[in-house]
Amino acid sequence: MNAKLGPAAFLAIILACAVVLAILPFVMPPFYVRVGQLMLYSAGLAIAWAILGGFAGYASFGHAAFIGVGAFAAGLVEDRFPGLPTPLLLPLGLLAGGAACAVLSAVVAYPILRLRGTFFAIAMLGVCKVCAELNNNVDFFQGSLGLNFPAIAPPDWDPAIFYYQLYLVAGVAVLLIAWQIRRSRFGAGLLSIREDEDTARMLGVPTERYKRQAFVISAVLTGLLGVIYAHSLGYITTDSVYRDDTNLSLIVYSLLGGMGTLFGPVIGAFMLVFVTQVILARLLDFHLFATGLLLVVLVLTAPGGIIGLVRGFRQRRRAKNVAPAE
Amino acid sequence: MSGTPILRVEGLSKAFRGLKAISDVTFNVVSGSITSIIGPNGAGKSTLFNLVTGYLAPTAGRVSFKDRLITGMPTNRIAELGVARAFQIARPFRDLSVAENVRIGALFGKAGARDVEAMTRHALELAAMTELADQPASALTVGQLRHLEVARAIATRADLLLADEPCAGLNPTETAAMIDVLRRIRTSGVTVVLVEHDMPSVMEVSDRILVLESGRLIADGTPAEVSSNPQVIKAYLGTPD
Amino acid sequence: MNLIAQTLADGLVLGGIYALAAVGFSLIFGVLHVINLSHGIIVLMGAYLALILSETLHIDPLLTMPLVMAILAGVGYVYQRFLIQYAVDSTPFASILLTFGVALMMNNIMIWLFSPDMRNITPSYAFASFRLGPIAFDAVRVSCLAASLVLLSCLAALLKYTSLGRVIRATAQQTMAARLCGVNVRHVYAMTFAVSAAFAGAAGIVIGIILPFSPADEAIWTLNAFVVVVLGGVGSPAGALIGGLLLGIVSTLTAQYIGPSFPNVTMFLLLVLLLLVRPQGLLGNAFAPSR
């Protein structure tokens, strides 16, 4: 596990991977650059979701709400400053989107985190739907009309490569934040909340405060990624960002890779995007079916995801090696 | 062992819709001692325990810890003050190892500066769990889980440990091992209050024994005083006909 | 004044149908403690089956109900016994995710078989209407409401008076004790699911007659059922009826006085608020131990 690697070694490896990933788009055909974008974006979202769902055990079925809120907040604010020089647009959008998500999640956290398990999951889905419906039906948000985003890629860059690198930087940042959380006292507290919230509370873990913090951090990171996504699309409506399949995918990424682990969501995201975009590329009709089938198979055979399978395999091998000596 | 009461219970009462579970219980627990609460089934021992640790609000009376009123305080606040509880039905963090479980106690618990790793090691040693440190909690036996409960509670740097029937369901060897752990905890300066049924162990290890019957305190003294108390004998064995 | 009365009447009519659509979901939640996210799909299966049968057999769609219910009861039994059962005793999320996965697969299959277009089941007496005083009623909707109420009463009677109903209730209240009394709990679970699926399918026929439907509606009907349960209570036809009627009235009032595109917002807001305030619904859990 990560505990075996010292922090310096871990950082070195991550940075090395990032450099390799950064070079890739220059040698890949454009189709794969776009797939790479989607992989990195999904991995970032997956990690952000997992801070709340995997670490703390509060699996949300409605995180797309923050993608939507972040994206639309960014777009509406950027609209108000048409004369702003291009390099400042994205930072402004990120600020707006992040702030909006922070406020929304901070407010929603108090009531929503009183629920647990499946009730929490469904309530978050409800929150997402409320946001989506309001976005679509209240004119101010321009959800049904659509929102335009100015092009922010530098003029001499291929936009696809530009966004790829943006997603890469964002993804690495989110990964490092999650890694730092996991190593900290806060992270240990979150894990104990996931394991047994009442006992954690009794041991002195400030469960309510930690849950809220995890919720807000998760929401803001998701929102920031959503802002980048919106810019990469150029034009968004309610349906482009408040997506049911996103809500579902975020859970599947962690399930597939390993719920509660640091790299599980990344592995799950990479794999699922690869399967749907590359292997099933021509079979668009098949996507729903394939994801559904994957979900069913995972639940029945590998609830611990890929990392769970690997660990189980290692544990069994260790047991077999120990037994004969006794 | 100083003579200051670390825990003071005054006039504690609890009624559940007319049923008086605890009636006017008053006692002090001296710092650095082991106090046992005993009594026949249904006497109200668990209720008393829950009242002291803040899981139940009393209908009357007060609980003070280190001269500070803790009646009805939320459980995590009480933990921050230095009171820890070990449950009879152990609730380990199953997916974490023994050491990681104990480490949670060391990371949180009583407010103040701490050396997390040292505290974890210390707690594991006191509870005789050092060898099992890397085992997943899900692989432990009942007896080992009880030790884990106690280790985790000690790791919170508590000054007072409340243990709820730590020897329940253990065989004589395991019981002796647990009593040994409690002795070591007392030696390290932590006050222990336990609810227990196992009479020989209670008589052997306690500095003071409180006897409850039908929600009332009927005896409060040393093991010798209590075992020769006619009221206590009557409560447990009945009067000869 | 007339407008409010009309809106309320419309809401009640709609609500009765919501109730029927939700009762199966409620039963499964109460007895198996499973949140069946494939519920909406089963409702739609009822609608599509009725469409096919009424067109090929040339009979009134409401008359296909017994056959559709029988078919879906069988499907439900097999689905529960040989698939969901494996997730029932696992983590609470396992059954949600499993049923969600199945819903996705069936959604895709329905799109292949029936195309994503909106369909409609048109009975012969469509477009007829009558008036009761100042309030207009649509004949189709009222006959569907009548069918819903009849079916809900039948289910209530089944649960209360038949031996199957008793064994379902016993298993829901005390599963371990039921096992010790020799109840084959897996079979009971499967039977409960069969009953639930049958009624979901019946609801689908009713819905298919009143509204245009397509495979994309499945999520809405599942969420609808969830809101009805959270409003009215778990595990009883009476709870489903109360929840359904309330939801129906809220929907029509919202559509009339706030805006035609807002009923969904209200529904979801209600869902979130109720989960926070009173998740067990007005009538509570029908299978909870009595005081």
Image (cartoon, rainbow, N blue to C red):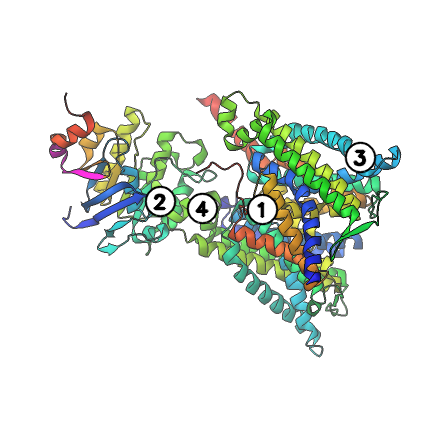
Quadrant for the C terminus of chain B in the image: top left
| Crowd tier of the residue under label 3, counting other residues whose Cα lies within 10 Å: few below 14, some 14–19, many 20 or above | few
Task: Say whether mark 3 and mark 1 are on the same chain.
Answer: yes
Task: Say whether mark 2 and mark 3 are on the same chain.
Answer: no
Distance from disc 1 to disc 4, alpha carbons, whole Å, reads 30 Å
Q: Kindly indicate whether the residue at mark 4 contacts the one at mark 1 (C-beta within 8 angstroms).
A: no
Q: Kindly indicate whether the residue at mark 4 contacts the one at mark 3 (C-beta within 8 angstroms).
A: no
Q: How many marks?
A: 4
Residue labelled with disc 1: C232
Residue labelled with disc 2: B120
| Crowd tier of the residue under label 4, counting other residues whose Cα lies within 10 Å: few below 14, some 14–19, many 20 or above | many
Q: What kind of element bears circle 2?
A: helix
Tell me the amino acid under the disc marked 4.
Glu
Distance from disc 1 to disc 3, alpha carbons, whole Å, reads 30 Å
Distance from disc 2 to disc 1, alpha carbons, whole Å, reads 50 Å
Residue labelled with disc 3: C63
Tell me the amino acid under the disc marked 1.
Gly
Q: What kind of element bears circle 3?
A: helix
State which region is magenta.
Answer: B216-226
Q: What kind of element bears circle 1?
A: helix
Chain for numbered disc 2 = B
Q: Kindly indicate whether the residue at mark 1 contacts the one at mark 2 (C-beta within 8 angstroms).
A: no
Tell me the amino acid under the disc marked 3.
Leu
Residue B222 lies in the magenta-colored region: yes
- Give the side of residue B168 with respect to residue A68, left or right: left
Distance from disc 3 to disc 4, alpha carbons, whole Å, reads 53 Å
Chain for numbered disc 4 = A
Residue labelled with disc 4: A197
Distance from disc 3 to disc 2, alpha carbons, whole Å, reads 72 Å
Point out the frontmost of discs 1 and 4.
Answer: 1
